[in-house]
Amino acid sequence: MLNLLFLAANLGVFISALVLVTLWDPIQKLLSMISLFLFSSFIFLIMNFFFLGLTYLIVYIGAIAILFLFVIMMVPLEAHPKG
């Protein structure tokens, strides 16, 4: 059962990374990056690295992703590439 959870989390990391590279919309990219961090944190929690998993949640999602969101919201809409 644990192997299936690990495989599902790795598949989620791969799909999130693929979506992150292929999208053009900055908000969708940010949401994909947050899901990538969530799946990475879940992998660490499965492997019993609790401190590292919770650090991913707090530092990467709680600080860096929210900072990126504020920066994206501050940029004028005309500066975004039209895809």
Image (tube, rainbow, N blue to C red):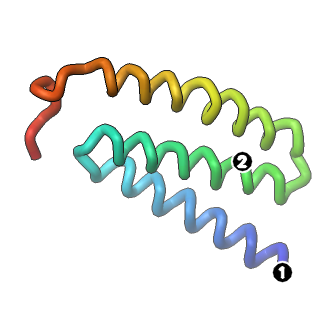
The residue pinned by badge 1 equals 1
The residue pinned by badge 2 equals 41
| Residue in the image at 64% along x and 49% along y | 38
Q: Looking at the image, is 51 positioned above or below residue 45? A: above
| Label located before the other in sequence (2 or 1) | 1
In terms of image quadrants, where is residue 46?
bottom right
Seen from the viewer's position, the closer of residues 61 and 11 is 61
Give percent across and percent down for residue 69: 43, 29
| Residue in the image at 62% along x and 63% along y | 10
Give percent across and percent down for residue 35: 54, 51
50 sits to left or right of 60? right
Say what secondary structure mark 1 lies in: loop
Q: What's the distance in space between the residues labelled 2 and 1, CA to CA?
A: 18 Å
Q: Looking at the image, is 5 positioned above or below residue 52? A: below
Crowd around label 2: few <14 · some 14–19 · many ≥20 (10 Å):
many
Q: Amino acid at mark 2?
A: Ser
| Residue in the image at 72% along x and 32% along y | 58
Do the numbered discs 2 and 1 sit on residues whose CB atoms are within 8 Å? no
Quarter of the image where the N terminus is located: bottom right
Q: Amino acid at mark 1?
A: Met
Crowd around label 1: few <14 · some 14–19 · many ≥20 (10 Å):
few
Q: Looking at the image, is 40 positioned above or below residue 62? A: below
Q: Looking at the image, is 13 positioned above or below residue 70? A: below
Seen from the viewer's position, the closer of residues 42 and 31 is 31
5 sits to left or right of 28? right
5 sits to left or right of 14? right
In terms of image quadrants, where is residue 39?
bottom right
Give percent across and percent down for residue 2: 84, 73
Say what secondary structure mark 2 lies in: helix
Seen from the viewer's position, the closer of residues 21 and 27 is 27
